[in-house]
């Protein structure tokens, strides 16, 4: 049940070095591409990285992604804001951060459903970090590195925790 996956998902920062299979990677990317986007513009592309040298370079430039030194996989979400330019007289423009966030969450949930751990490491909107990731991956200026998602077999088991806070809800009846 999807609620079980949502309740059990946690950010995992310690991974075993067991490779993630191509079939699992494809399943993660398919889940991402099933997410909604403004006017179905799908303003993204994905870079699936299993190369140890590149994973280490990303860990070197991102202070909060040091788990990439051990993670066997990273998926970099690359936003393509220009995909929304002029769509339906501007209706879709500017929604790419929400669209990429939805696709990212689908990856995190699919990883949990596959028994894998994951951790979303933000890149956008931090200009120096975006520049560093662009350089590591050879991205063009029109491509926005949105985040890096570390993925692999879990080597830690944080307990699920409830997060519902009634005081943050306003009821309009």
Image: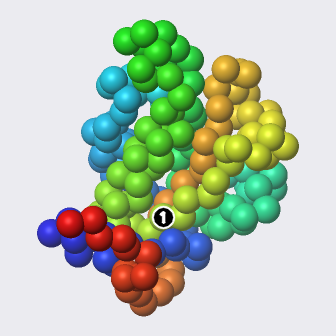
Question: At which x and y percent is residue 115?
Answer: 32, 69
Horizontal relation, residue 35 to residue 99: left or right = left
Name the residue tied to disc 1: 118
Horizontal relation, residue 173 to residue 15: left or right = left
Query: What color scheme is it?
Result: rainbow
Q: Name the residue rendered at 47%, 27% in the picture.
A: 43
In terms of secondary structure, where does tag 1 sit?
A: strand
Residue situated furthest right in the rendering: 128
Q: Is the residue 27 above or below the residue 85 in the image?
A: below
Residue 131 appears in which quarter of the rendering? top right
Most foreground residue, 101 or 150: 101
Q: Name the residue rendered at 52%, 14% in the picture.
A: 85
Question: At which x and y percent is residue 145?
Answer: 65, 38
Q: Name the residue rendered at 70%, 44% in the picture.
A: 125
Question: At which x and y percent is residue 77?
Answer: 54, 40
Most foreground residue, 123 or 168: 168
Task: Say few, some or many: other residues with alpha carbon within 10 Å of mark 1 (under 14 / 14 to 19 / 20 or more).
Answer: many
Question: At which x and y percent is residue 84?
Answer: 48, 19
Residue 107 seen in this snapshot? no
Most foreground residue, 124 or 132: 124
Quadrant showing the C terminus: bottom left
Most foreground residue, 52 or 167: 167
Q: Is the residue 26 above or below the residue 70 in the image?
A: above
Residue 138 seen in this snapshot? yes
Q: How many marks?
A: 1
Q: Name the residue rendered at 35%, 52% in the picture.
A: 106
Residue situated furthest front in the rendering: 173
Quadrant showing the N terminus: bottom left
């Amino acid at each position: 049940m999807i609620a079980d996956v949502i309740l059990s998902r946690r950010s995992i920062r310690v991974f075993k070095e067991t490779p993630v299979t191509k079939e699992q990677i494809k399943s993660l990317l398919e889940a991402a591409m099933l997410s909604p986007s403004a006017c179905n513009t799908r303003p993204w592309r994905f870079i699936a990285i299993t190369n140890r040298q590149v994973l280490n370079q990303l860990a070197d430039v991102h202070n909060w992604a040091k788990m990439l030194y051990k993670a066997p996989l990273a998926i970099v979400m690359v936003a393509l804001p220009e995909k929304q330019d002029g769509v339906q007289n501007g209706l879709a423009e500017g929604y790419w951060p929400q669209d990429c966030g939805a696709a990212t969450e689908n990856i995190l949930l699919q990883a949990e459903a596959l028994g894998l751990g994951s951790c979303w490491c933000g890149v956008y909107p931090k200009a120096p970090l975006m520049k560093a990731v662009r350089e590591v991956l050879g991205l063009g200026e029109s491509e926005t590195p949105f985040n890096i998602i570390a993925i692999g077999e879990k080597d830690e088991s944080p307990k699920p925790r409830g997060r519902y806070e009634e005081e943050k809800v306003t009821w309009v009846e």
